[in-house]
Amino acid sequence: MEETRPAAPGRGGPLILPRAEHSLSRRDIDPDALKILFRLQRLGFTAYLTGGAVRDMLLGRKPKDFDIATDARPNQIRKYFANAFIIGRRFRLAHIRFRGGKVVEVATFRSDPPPPPEGGAGGSAPLYVFGTPEQDAWRRDITVNALFYDPTTASVIDHVGGVADLRQGRIRVIGDAGARFREDPVRVWRVIRYAARLGFAIDGELAAAIRAQRELLGGCSQARLYEEFSKDLLGARARDVFALHREFGILRLLLGGIGEALENDGRMFAASLALLAVADAEKEAGRAPGLDELVALLLWPWAGPRLGTGGPDPFPLLKKAFLDAGMVVSLPKGLRAQVIDVLALAVRLLRALGDGNMRWSVRQRPNYEPASRLCFMITQGRVPEEGESFELLFQKAFPGRPPMGGGRPRRRRRRRPVTPQ
Ligand code: ATP
Ligand code: MG
């Protein structure tokens, strides 16, 4: 059974913008993505560039990645491209891999699955069915993400009114927002992300739908939530994205007690935003901060004060605070341990910067580098430049102290506890 949706209201077919009427230049398309597009078309398939790449290029921005939509089926894509790998549990699509880790995603046009029968248990309904380009546009999340670019004619194809929304700077969900959020609550998150990242408006009706459906996010798979969370942090304008999440009350839904604290305490949250802005500037300068650093920056204003009197080893205290927070987005264990270790070490370094008691042996700790960098960012509001470091900050604050590694006699740590006789 195939579901069909009506074309954009008031139009017979899609709006087609010829080359002269848009600013997307073929030269800005990744050459490998362009080769895939032309190869598919030479083989007789329809193949378009779509998603964020078309949206960003029309806005004159550099796209993060290049997604392709085609009527070639996944097994055909694999047949014609030796470097194609079929992936995905929810949707089967092809990743075409290139040297240097570049991946171009090639997905077959599909339509939304038919809705499960009223009162039915669902479960047996297919996750998706292949469809036409028009159906593929209609199953997407927001109008500005559903445009196609045809490389042969250099035209932009718009089935959903995305061009007008792009021009007017407005985020609009394709179809009925409430229903689309119930179908896939991650769309609530995506609406907020792209509104913030693009600086686009969310109208009152959409804002009300977000508020009405946001609780559904808590029921999404943890893996998907973690994926979206990392996209927000790693992507552009994380500061603005998190600010808008807070406005819509999303943080407490995702980050449990930590999110509640960030939403309730304006000063704490402002400090998080200021640190994310430092990281955003780094991204713009082409130096991508790691996910561990970004999580540490977001959470520092929550974690720091908690550890003010944390004793000699803040690690267990912070670990417990993390577990008690009941985060819905659960960080993979390795990342969580890394973030906790960096935060805990940063607390010790900051204390040293306050009271001058520095044990330079901490420099041997594997996370000393990221922790000292975090300290620099917290205290200076920017990343250290060439020749700057935490050590120099310390020496400036306490010029009389013995130099690193020397001066103080080292106390030998006892390896085995002495058992009382
Ligand atoms: P960017 O990659 O710059 O963050 P993007 O729009 O390309 O932006 P992706 O996550 O790469 O985002 O998704 C590619 C496209 O897939 C989107 O543009 C959208 O059309 C569609 N899409 C992604 N997630 C959903 C979803 N949950 N529901 C419907 N369509 C989606
Ligand atoms: Mg993308």
Image (cartoon, rainbow, N blue to C red):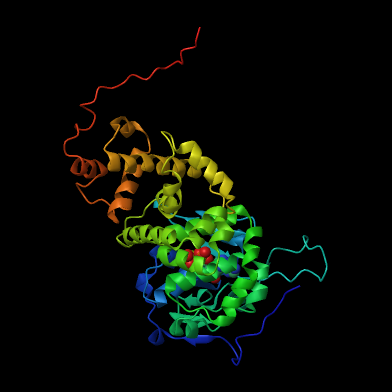
Residue 69: x and y in percent read 54, 69
Report whether 333 appears left or right of 384.
right
Q: Nearer the viewer, residue 291 or 410?
A: 410
Residue 376: x and y in percent read 29, 49
Above/below status of 125 relative to 142: above
Residue 148: x and y in percent read 51, 76
Residue ranking furthest to the left: 400
Q: Say which residue appears at 50% left-offset and 86% top-offset.
A: 16
Q: Nearer the viewer, residue 417 or 207?
A: 417
Above/below status of 210 relative to 84: below
Q: Say which residue appears at 24% left-offset and 45% top-offset.
A: 389
User: Residue 43: in sight, yes or no?
Assistant: no
Q: Nearer the viewer, residue 355 or 174?
A: 355
Above/below status of 391 relative to 134: above
Residue ranking furthest to the top: 421
Above/below status of 360 relative to 221: above
Q: Nearer the viewer, residue 142 or 405?
A: 405
Report whether 184 appears left or right of 42.
right
Dividing the picture into quarters, in which one does residue 94 lie? bottom right
**Number of numbered discs on residues:** 0
User: Residue 63: in sight, yes or no?
Assistant: yes
Dividing the picture into quarters, in which one does residue 178 lie? bottom right
Residue ranking furthest to the right: 119
- Quadrant where the N terminus lies? bottom right
Residue 20: x and y in percent read 38, 87
